[in-house]
Image: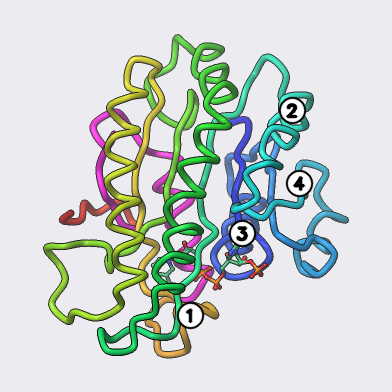
């Protein structure tokens, strides 16, 4: 792939994905790492001093009014080649999880960041994704053309829900899964591939210290899985290592 844009790269999986993309055997020409406060993203800024293919842009994914200017800036860099991959990673998970602690503000805020924002950002980047798909029209579907990866969670699986709770988070991710499926159908004729991806349970600020996977292992496998995506996976829910998950 020539180019990828990732949201939420200040820490956790977003930062981990950037690190893996910088060391993978198939180098990416442009890595657009976005985060809310670039000035505070120290590790990301350090990486930038060593890697010319890393571009950092400020982006709060709920600031929809800022999207057009970002799209324009990216367009000026990628030009006719378009944007190959949009990875909607930024997300939140509120602390209150059981039904008697559910707060309407948590439900709304989580839906805004985890579901509304990825749909709106995807909408804004469709012209650049289409451009990339067209530019590489002799290639099969996948990251060589154009791909949308929505960072989901197994907690958004209805079939896998054995423990209940986590209303805001589970609801936001199951809705993101549905958005992913619709995108995969709506963008099929443009040969833009869409998947919902579960990164595993990972030791980040969100995943906590009991999680079995470290950031490097999850991100290393996610990068390999993303690079190898093919048409048969369009519109599916997969985990970091490519294994299919139940909706
Ligand atoms: N860790 C896991 O076990 C796990 C499992 C399943 C799914 N996931 C999903 O993986 C993604 C990343 O999670 P993580 O574990 O890396 O979480 P994290 O360590 O809490 O990091 C979350 C990232 O999202 C950013 N973010 C939050 N709201 C934002 C906004 N409005 N605009 C821009 N950026 C925003 C944060 O930026 P700031 O630094 O500015 O707050 C941070 O960079 C999420 O979508 C999460 O739901 C994680």
Residue at 37% over, 30% down: 193
Give the residue number, with chain letter if any, for mark 4: 54
Q: Does the numbered disc 2 mark a residue whose Cβ is under 8 Å from ligand 1? A: no
Distance between mark 1 and mark 3 Cα atoms: 16 Å
Give the residue number, with chain letter if any, for mark 3: 8
Give the residue number, with chain letter if any, for mark 1: 203
List the single residue furthest toward the front. 104
Q: Does the numbered disc 3 mark a residue whose Cβ is under 8 Å from ligand 1? A: yes
Give the residue number, with chain letter if any, for mark 2: 72
Q: Secondary structure at mark 4?
A: strand
Q: Does the numbered disc 1 mark a residue whose Cβ is under 8 Å from ligand 1? A: yes
Which is in the foreground here, disc 1 or disc 2? 2
Q: Is residue 187 magenta?
A: no
With respect to residue 223, does 187 lie above or below? above
Q: Which residues are magenta?
A: 214-240
The earlier-in-sequence mark between 1 and 2 is 2
Residue at 63% over, 63% down: 15
Which is in the foreground here, disc 2 or disc 4? 2
Distance between mark 2 and mark 4 Cα atoms: 17 Å
The earlier-in-sequence mark between 4 and 1 is 4
Write down the quadrant of residue 64 in the picture.
top right
Q: Is residue 233 magenta?
A: yes
Q: Pick whichever, 218 or 74, lies toward us.
A: 74
The earlier-in-sequence mark between 1 and 3 is 3
Left or right, 76 with reference to 226? right
Which is in the foreground here, disc 4 or disc 3? 3
With respect to residue 85, does 199 lie above or below? below
Distance between mark 4 and mark 3 Cα atoms: 15 Å
């Amino acid at each position: 792939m020539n180019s990828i844009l990732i949201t939420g790269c200040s820490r956790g999986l977003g930062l981990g994905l950037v690190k893996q993309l910088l060391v993978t055997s198939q180098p990416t020409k442009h890595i657009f790492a976005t985060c809310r406060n670039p000035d505070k993203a120290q590790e990301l800024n350090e990486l930038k001093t060593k890697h010319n293919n890393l571009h950092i842009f400020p982006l709060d994914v709920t600031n929809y009014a800022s999207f057009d200017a970002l799209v324009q800036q990216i367009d000026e860099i990628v030009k006719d080649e378009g944007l190959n991959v949009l990875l909607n990673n930024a997300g939140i998970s509120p602390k209150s999880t059981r039904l008697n602690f559910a707060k309407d503000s948590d439900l709304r805020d989580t839906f805004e960041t985890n579901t509304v924002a990825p749909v709106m950002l995807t909408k804004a980047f469709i012209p650049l994704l289409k451009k990339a798909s067209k530019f590489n029209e002799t290639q099969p579907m996948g990251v060589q053309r154009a791909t949308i990866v929505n960072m989901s969670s197994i907690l958004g699986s209805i079939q896998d829900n054995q423990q209940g709770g986590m209303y805001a988070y589970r609801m936001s991710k199951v809705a993101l899964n549905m958005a992913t499926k619709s995108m995969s159908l709506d963008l099929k004729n443009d040969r833009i591939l869409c998947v919902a991806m579960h990164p595993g349970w990972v030791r980040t600020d969100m995943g906590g210290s009991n999680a079995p996977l470290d950031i490097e292992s999850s991100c290393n496998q996610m990068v390999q899985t993303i690079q190898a995506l093919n048409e048969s996976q369009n519109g599916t829910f997969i985990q970091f290592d490519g294994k299919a998950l139940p909706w």
